[in-house]
Amino acid sequence: MAICVVGHSNPDTDSVTSAIALATLLNAQGQEAKACMQSAVDNLNPESTMVLERFGLTAPEEVTDVAGQDVALVDFSDIGQGPANLADANVVTIVDHHKIGDVTTNNPILFRAEPVGCTGTVLNKMFKEAGVAIPKDIAGGMLAAILSDTVNFKSPTCTEDDKVAVSELKVVAGVDDTEALFMDMLKAKSSVDGVPAKDLLFRDYKDFDMKGNKVGVGQLELATIDQVAAIRDDLVKAMEEVKADGRHSVLLMLTDVVKEGTDLVVLSDDTALIEGAFSGKLEGGSMWIDGMMSRKKQTVPNLQNAFGC
Ligand code: MG
Ligand code: MG
Ligand code: MG
């Protein structure tokens, strides 16, 4: 029975390409393994779909239940992020870069976790240590995963090891311009073409209670703010509808991942309070906040302070 190599649910590029890479390494070492993912090909996120196409990789097959199977986990070790019945599977290997989860085993296994930015970085080391050459297409996938997970080295999770892995993998993959590759991935991920404005507003949206006031904050991560220029009025209209449903304020973070800042679109019963929260001045309903990338770390705390929470 082939080992099912699988990454976490709602798979990202690292989960998909690491499953392919580890299955390849295991096969090269004489263990029968197949790459799997917890998604149908049609439902795979646009960034990963683009990466598979770009490097000519076959999408891993979908797996939903691993009862009784031999499985290898990549990019996670939490039972809750695994396929159904993971607790009844035989976990034979784990390669990861997250905190250690709650998977347990009855036998000793190869468990390789490192505090680096991407599972692909760990796998690059494993190929080297095993003396197995990484096929060109798979190197491309691993390269893309590292750029994605580390947000092109900008994430605080990025390490020197990730940069070394990228410098090695780009040569194997025949990729000269990793910046261009990252931008193509970002554009795929942040594509807004044909998506209704309200869906975009709710793509990544949360409501918060601020001292009895309902405040909604959405975020769109973009390669450039220009991506939404043509639909900006529609977005504001969607925000107006949402605000009319009993909200004190609705904010939409249009985050420019390249410029590392956010154009904060604001609808509020008290715009002065929102301006004060971010020491900014609204012009035409929005204000540019340099360095604002994270709703959790940079937007919500400022709002809570301003509302006196
Ligand atoms: Mg992941
Ligand atoms: Mg990862
Ligand atoms: Mg990720």
Image (cartoon, rainbow, N blue to C red):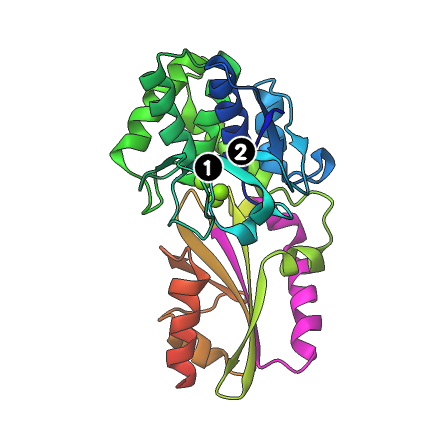
Point out residue 51 in the picture as x, y percentages from the top left corner: 57, 27
- The quadrant of the picture occupied by the N terminus is top right
User: Magenta: predominant secondary structure element?
Assistant: helix
> In the rendered structure, does residue 63 fall within the stretch colored magenta?
no
Point out residue 292 in the picture as x, y percentages from the top left corner: 39, 58
Q: Mark 1 against mark 2, which lies toward the viewer?
A: 1
Q: Furthest-left residue in view?
A: 160
Residue type at mark 1: give it: Ser
Residue at label 1? 148
**Disc 2 on helix, strand or loop?**
helix
**Closer to us: 158 or 33:** 33
**Closer to us: 18 or 50:** 18
Mark 2 or mark 1, which is nearer the start of the sequence? 1
Point out residue 229 in the picture as x, y percentages from the top left corner: 60, 49
Q: Is mark 2 within 8 Å of ligand 3?
A: no
294 versus 285 height, above or below? above
> Dividing the picture into quarters, in which one does residue 213 lie?
bottom right
Characterize the local packing of mark 2: few (<14), some (14-19) or many (20 or more) Cα atoms within 10 angstroms. many
Q: Furthest-bottom residue in view?
A: 212
**Disc 1 on helix, strand or loop?**
helix
Residue drawn 62% across and 32% down?
36
Residue drawn 45% across and 80% down?
272
Question: Label 2 near label 1: C-beta < 8 Å?
Answer: yes
Q: Is mark 1 within 8 Å of ligand 3?
A: yes
Residue at label 2? 185
Magenta extent: 227-255
